[in-house]
Image (spheres, rainbow, N blue to C red):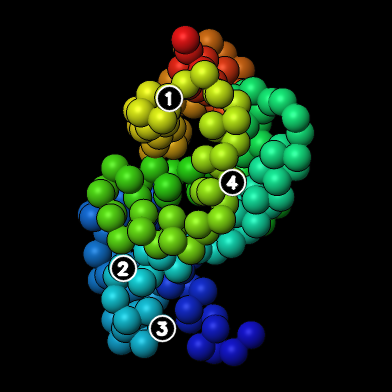
């Protein structure tokens, strides 16, 4: 890898850790350059501005996650019948496979996505929904097919309530797992949290 490539990766790695820990709004470029051991000019050269750096940090995960999720959703849509549990389960496998992309990748990705929404990073939501529009189309189709008796307005609100629950869980995943381990004993990992979350979300979306 070239020196330029190494510098770019150092910036992304430092930014990723700091964004996950402190949020996007409370992490300055100077803090990132200090942790990465590079100067501010390097960030400007490789990314131009903070928004572009934020997208680059998320894109490394999204480019791994979204194509696999699209495959899972296409397989689901090929079935005649399925439930909301099946829809949410289709997300689980691609998400957990992020651990093969980076150590603790699934949890890190969840934290970063959660931070993106709680920090009101509008540009990030636009970036995700426009770059991966086909995946969101497949997901929407799957939700409507799993709930044929619900009208579009009801599904609109229930999906937004679902998003709120998911974002809170993502942004607070570290704290939640620590509390659960302390109160109930035993190791709690990302998969355990997802397995608790899916039935709750599915019941909420599909409620009469």
Q: Earlier in the sequence, mark 4 or mark 3?
A: 3
| Front label number (1 vs 3) | 1
Mark 1 neighbour density, 10 Å: few (under 14) some (14–19) many (20 or more) = few
Q: Secondary structure at mark 2?
A: helix
Q: Which mark is residue 46?
A: 3
Measured from the top left, where is residue 168 in percent x and y? 37, 32
User: For this rendering, which residue is in front, 44 or 122?
Assistant: 122
User: For this rendering, which residue is in front, 25 or 197?
Assistant: 197
User: For this rendering, which residue is in front, 201 or 140?
Assistant: 140
Measured from the top left, where is residue 117 in percent x and y? 33, 45
3 sits to left or right of 76: left
Measured from the top left, where is residue 135 in percent x and y? 57, 51
Residue 175 appears in the picture as rendered: no
Q: Earlier in the sequence, mark 1 or mark 3?
A: 3
67 sits to left or right of 207: right
Q: Which mark is residue 58?
A: none
Which residue is identified by label 1?
A: 151
Q: Residue at x 66, y 36 (%)?
A: 90
| Front label number (2 vs 4) | 4
Q: Earlier in the sequence, mark 1 or mark 4?
A: 4
Label 2 to label 4: alpha-carbon separation: 28 Å
Which residue is identified by label 4?
A: 138
Label 1 to label 4: alpha-carbon separation: 18 Å
Q: Earlier in the sequence, mark 2 or mark 3?
A: 3
Which residue is identified by label 2?
A: 51
Measured from the top left, where is residue 44 in percent x and y? 32, 83
The answer to whether the residues at label 1 and label 3 have Cβ atoms under 8 Å apart is no
């Amino acid at each position: 890898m070239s020196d330029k490539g190494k510098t770019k990766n150092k910036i992304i790695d430092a930014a990723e850790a700091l964004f996950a820990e402190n949020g996007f709004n409370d992490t300055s470029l100077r803090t990132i350059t200090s942790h990465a051991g590079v100067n501010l000019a390097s960030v400007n050269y490789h990314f131009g501005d903070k928004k572009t750096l934020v997208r680059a940090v998320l894109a490394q995960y999204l480019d791994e996650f979204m194509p696999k999720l699209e495959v899972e959703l296409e397989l689901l849509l090929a079935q005649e019948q399925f439930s909301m549990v099946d829809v949410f389960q289709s997300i689980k496998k691609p998400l957990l496979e992020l651990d093969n992309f980076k150590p603790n990748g699934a949890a890190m990705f969840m934290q970063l996505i959660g931070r993106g929404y709680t920090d009101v990073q509008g540009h990030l939501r636009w970036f995700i929904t426009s770059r991966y529009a086909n995946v969101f189309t497949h997901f929407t189709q799957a939700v409507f097919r799993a709930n044929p008796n619900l009208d579009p307005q009801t599904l609109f609100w229930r999906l937004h309530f679902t998003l709120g629950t998911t974002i809170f869980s993502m942004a607070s995943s570290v704290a939640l797992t620590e509390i659960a381990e302390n109160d109930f004993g035993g190791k709690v990992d990302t998969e355990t949290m997802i397995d608790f979350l899916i039935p709750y979300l599915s019941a909420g979306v599909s409620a009469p």
